[in-house]
Image (cartoon, helix red, strand yellow):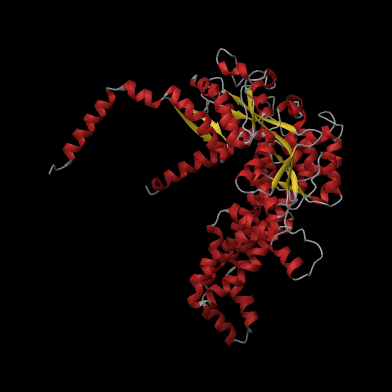
């Protein structure tokens, strides 16, 4: 038997180190990697399966997935713009605009991203051409079918019936980043207001206040409905269908007659990110990959070549049939709305 | 040379505690134009809304601390003086809530006290004591109860540790000299255990002061500084205001800590 003494061990380790040192190309190829972003849960699984896997197969590089949320990723890029810690950003449109205006992200062009040609121009223009929307959900009325036999079909009916005490409704709290768009703007618009006038929204909330509970995060909303704390509420279509497919067959969704708000997810590339990020983003915009992503996530996607399955077709609202929020205008008044909410609603 | 042993810890604290605090303080003082400004602190200290939020934060922490003392002292007393061989089981039961995730614990409160939850179903359908479901969750009361549930073990363990070291012969001497059980407790046991109450109060107050998840999920109308700080980061992206709020929260916590220490030392002297 060979005896492994200290001298042999050091000698072997030195030889191994020397051998590795002689193969710099191999070491570099293995180390080539980028960091992409994803939300947690089913989102992460979908990103790995639909975008990371084809990217790695084509480029032989590795895509590490950083979990978190847009405010955190944007803050990271702001803190280190010369060497951003993430190479691909997934952002809410208002934060995508913040990043675009600050010059933190690159322009999207068909030369860099061939699949961009298949994305409607409006969706790229909505974030100043420095990114594009690749997926979207609609904020509408989600309800418990067992407890709500005749659900409200519009925001107006929703407000009236909640105000009368027919239901307790769960709506997003102001701590949830998208609330200014999916609730304040959407409801203000439904009642004749808009970015410049959100009084109708605050009047509606005043009417409903005795019968409202507030959700801080999407899972919290599901807990409200499943525990019986609320019968219905304002929520996303995709997440509703995810719960349905996971066994909560008592849940259902209605896009209100006035039109629910479009809540898009933008993809962007920080200015000094690794150029390999373009290859990854091109995969994000690819029709085949987006089809699979939509199938997993139950959210609409934006490549015009995507054909939804029969199961998905009735669930997806075409983005043209949603209320398209003026993200840039909302970003200007968002903090005033939050301040007013804190003082008048308080949760 | 013994100070060298403390150097790694001091260095660690300096890099990961002192420097970030200084950075945070500076961020709260620099305006959007890069000039020094006190406008954020001025708003926090004069605007009635922010004053109410600060008061609510302090009252919540103080209230939770007081309830934990009232619940925790008898439990600690029984644990030290009466439990005998059950002491291990009582300690396990005390610590058990801390072994589960805070999200799960909070969801448990929702399941129990929701409008269609276990308690309401019992009162409404099984016992017929009420005509309509009670709104038990999403109220300040349930948030306070959930915080007490999590924090009372800290109070019990702090008091129990000190109670254990109280010399029981002192109480027996007081009784021999004519004091009743209540007087012996009031004049001997309680003053000697004040250090434990003080330690527990500081722990509970500090944790309640910065509590976030429980209030987000069960807060029901409570507005506290940690919730507003999160909002500044997540919704409005006003990092300067978030920094000013967190500095205010720190000052509030340190002031209360100082007052509690003074109080305990004076009473215990």
Q: Position of residue B81 (x, y in %)?
A: 54, 77
Residue A324, quarter of picture: top right
Q: Quadrant of residue B263?
A: bottom right
Closer to us: B212 or A200: A200
Q: Position of residue A347 (x, y in %)?
A: 75, 46
Image spot of residue B43 (x, y percent): 76, 38
Question: Which of B219 and A156 lies nearest the eye of the viewer?
Answer: A156
Which residue of the protein is positioned furthest toward the left in this rendering?
A: A1
**Residue at horizontal 62%, vertical 23%?**
A303
Query: Residue at the spot x=27%, y=22% of the render?
Result: A22
Whether residue A200 is visible to the viewer of this picture, yes or no, is: yes
Image position, residue A245 (x, y; %):
61, 44
Viewer-proximal residue, B132 or B62?
B132
B142 horizontally vs B103: left or right: right
> Do we see residue A273 in this rendering?
no
- Quarter that holds the N terminus of chain A: top left
* Residue plotted at (37% across, 26% down): A30
């Amino acid at each position: 038997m060979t005896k492994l003494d200290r001298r042999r061990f050091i000698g072997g380790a030195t030889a191994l180190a020397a051998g590795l040192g002689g193969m710099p190309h191999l070491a570099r190829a293995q180390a080539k990697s980028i960091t992409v972003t994803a939300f947690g849960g089913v989102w992460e699984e979908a990103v790995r399966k639909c975008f990371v896997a084809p990217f790695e197969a084509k480029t032989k590089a590795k895509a590490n997935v950083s979990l978190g949320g847009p405010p955190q990723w944007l803050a990271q890029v702001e803190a280190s713009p010369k060497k951003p810690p993430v190479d691909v950003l997934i952002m809410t449109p208002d934060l995508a605009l913040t990043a675009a205006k600050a010059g933190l992200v690159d322009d999207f062009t068909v030369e860099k991203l061939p699949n961009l040609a298949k994305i409607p121009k409006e969706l790229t223009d909505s974030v100043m051409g420095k990114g594009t929307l690749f997926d979207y959900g609609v904020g509408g009325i989600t309800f418990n079918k067992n407890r709500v036999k005749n659900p409200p079909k519009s925001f107006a009916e929703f407000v009236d019936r909640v105000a009368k005490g027919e239901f307790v409704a769960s709506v997003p709290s102001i701590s949830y980043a998208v609330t200014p768009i999916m609730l304040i703007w959407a409801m203000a618009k439904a009642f004749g207001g808009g970015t410049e006038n959100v009084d109708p929204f605050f009047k509606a909330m005043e009417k409903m206040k005795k019968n409202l509970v507030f959700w801080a995060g999407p899972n919290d909303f599901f807990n409200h409905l499943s525990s019986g704390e609320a019968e219905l509420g304002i929520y996303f279509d995709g997440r509703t269908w995810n719960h349905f497919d996971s066994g909560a067959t008592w849940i259902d969704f209605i896009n209100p007659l006035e039109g629910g708000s479009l809540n898009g997810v933008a993809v962007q590339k920080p200015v000094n990110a690794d150029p390999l990020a373009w290859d990854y983003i091109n995969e994000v915009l690819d029709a085949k990959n987006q089809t699979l992503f939509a199938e997993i996530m139950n959210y609409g996607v934006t490549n015009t070549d995507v054909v939804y399955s029969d199961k998905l077709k009735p669930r997806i609202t075409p983005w043209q049939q949603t209320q398209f929020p003026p993200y840039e205008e909302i970003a200007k008044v968002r903090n005033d709305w939050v301040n007013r909410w804190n003082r008048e609603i308080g949760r | 040379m013994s100070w060298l042993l403390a150097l790694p810890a001091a260095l660690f604290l300096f890099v990961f505690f002192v420097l970030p605090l200084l950075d945070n303080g500076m961020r709260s003082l620099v305006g959007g134009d890069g000039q020094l400004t006190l406008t954020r602190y001025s708003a926090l200290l004069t605007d009635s809304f922010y004053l109410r939020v600060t008061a609510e934060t302090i009252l919540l922490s103080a209230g939770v601390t007081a309830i934990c003392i009232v619940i925790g002292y008898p439990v600690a007393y029984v644990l030290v003086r009466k439990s005998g061989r059950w002491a291990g089981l009582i300690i396990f039961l005390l610590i058990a809530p801390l072994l589960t995730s805070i999200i799960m614990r909070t969801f448990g409160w929702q399941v129990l006290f929701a409008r269609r939850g276990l308690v309401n179903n019992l009162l409404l359908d099984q016992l017929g004591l009420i005509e309509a479901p009670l709104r038990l969750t999403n109220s300040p009361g349930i948030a306070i109860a959930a915080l007490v549930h999590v924090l009372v073990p800290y109070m019990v363990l702090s008091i129990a540790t000190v109670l254990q070291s109280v010399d029981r012969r002192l109480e027996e001497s007081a009784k021999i000299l004519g004091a009743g059980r209540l007087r012996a407790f009031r004049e001997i046991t309680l003053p000697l255990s004040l250090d434990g109450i003080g330690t527990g109060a500081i722990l509970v107050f500090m944790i309640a002061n910065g509590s976030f998840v429980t209030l987000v999920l069960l807060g029901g109308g409570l507005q506290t500084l940690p919730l507003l700080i999160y909002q500044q980061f997540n919704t409005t992206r006003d990092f300067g205001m978030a920094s000013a709020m967190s500095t205010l929260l720190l000052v509030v916590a340190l002031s209360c800590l100082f007052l509690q220490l003074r109080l305990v030392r004076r009473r215990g002297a």
